[in-house]
Image (spheres, rainbow, N blue to C red):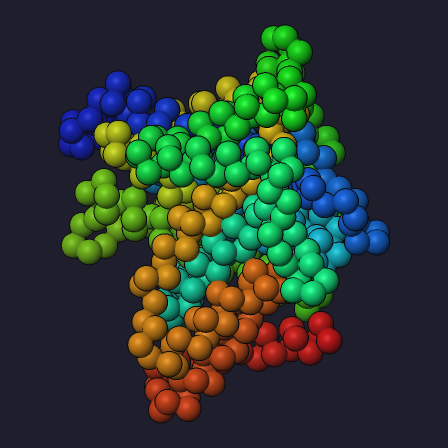
Amino acid sequence: MKKYFRFQELGTNYRTEFMAGLTTFLAMAYILFVIPSTMALEGVDQLPEGVTRINKEAVFTATAIAAAVGSLFMGLIAKYPIALGPGMGLNAFFAYTVVLGYGIPWQTALSGVLASGIIFIILTLTGFREKIINAIPANLKLAVGAGIGLFIAFIGFQSSGIIVGDDATLVALGDLTSPHVLLALFGVIVSVILLTLNVKGGIFYGMILTSIVGILCGLIDAPSGFGGIVGEVPSLAPTFGQAIAHFGDIFTLEMLVVILTFLFVDFFDTAGTLVAVATQAGLIRDNKLPRAGKALFSDSSATVVGAVVGTSTTTSYIESTAGVAAGGRSGFTPVVTAGFFLLALFFSPLLSVVTAEVTAPALIIVGVLMSSSLKEIDWDKFEIAVPAFFTIITMPLTYSIATGIALGFIFYPITMALKGRVKEIHPVMYGLFVIFILYFIFLS
């Protein structure tokens, strides 16, 4: 096994890789509770007509399995110290845009995730993926990431009651005397302190501390004994295979935009994370990423598996940098992380303790981290600033990641052409321009 994972060449060992895998798991463990809560639209009282709520416990199991399988694929096939899991941005898009905004049943939304995974695999195997990635301007990629960050943070502020609706101003500050709002604010403050002090797994520990304080203050029901912490693995029956059973429902213009959004955001997440983690680990060779095809195949295959078992798009996690910082250099690191995700399957009773007040701080902090890409956008060029700004600002304002992407991709060729930079616009962008114009016509 040492030879397979090239321990000697990479200057690592079992103990270092194990600790790196554990560190990565702790940095990612919050998704086990945030993903199910988000997909089940916890805190949302009224759903669109004809739409039912996805089973939270089944999503917990699906999330753990998708993260374990994806991390195993990445470790065993691509041999990179990168763990995978259902993506936070795509998870929010799935729940709040596709299901809540469009009124599309979660079963059909899972079919969209499955379709995007299959397309991702085909594009990876045929080599077209690189061409598509290169066709989309770097500034728009950065804007998409930042916009999703603001959208996720807004969801966290809203679900916790820190920000509420207002007839006069649309939104306003919530009731800061409410015990539940104060609990969420406590979670934000604790998480900020932990991350500022560079505590590995700060988001996860912040959730634990917030849950404990909520229980002590009587705001959250305490788990009853050992059985309230450890229990049987929740059944996948409510979600397993639904993506396949409803695959025939995806052939609409609306679902085409949904699938494209799943595909694009997964592209950006994966490419950015692979480069960032590989660079930190010193694995880049001649400015190229070795075994990039295998890494992308692992990512897309995990998305297919995740969709079948019942969770949103699986992608590479930037939290893997925590494991790399702990010394992880080989594919054995995510293999260890996968083991901990499987072990976590037996802790599903804790879902009852993780309320909206507990998950909201995690969403807000993740939003802060994702918004860091704002600094890399070329704001000095107006033709770039306009589509980037519209992409970023309209995601939280319209409650839709797809709308933000659509507006940005429509304005980009317009402003670039008016500036005389037509030759810099890739033909793919013209095709997307037409698709998104049709998208808005269809919505109207």
User: Which quadrant does the C terminus fall into?
Assistant: bottom right
The x and y percentages for residue 442 are: 71, 74
User: Which quadrant does the N terminus fall into?
Assistant: top left
Q: Is 302 placed left or right of 174 in the picture? A: left
The x and y percentages for residue 439 are: 65, 73
State whether residue 56 is above or below residue 14: below
Which residue lies at the image location 28% right of the left edge and 25% below the top edge? 17
The x and y percentages for residue 411 are: 49, 79
The x and y percentages for residue 292 are: 32, 50
Which residue lies at the image location 40% right of the left edge and 75% below the top edge? 385
State whether residue 433 is above or below residue 142: below
Tell me if I can see residue 381 in this picture: yes
Q: Quadrant of residue 283?
A: top left
Outermost residue toward the front in this view? 177
Give 318 or 190, whichever is nearer the viewer: 190
Outermost residue toward the right in this view? 49
Tell me if I can see residue 312 in this picture: no
Number of numbered tags placed on the structure image: 0
Which residue lies at the image location 45% right of the left edge and 82% below the top edge? 413
Q: Quadrant of residue 298?
A: top left
Q: Is 175 placed left or right of 290 in the picture? A: right
Which residue lies at the image location 64% right of the left edge and 17% below the top edge? 222
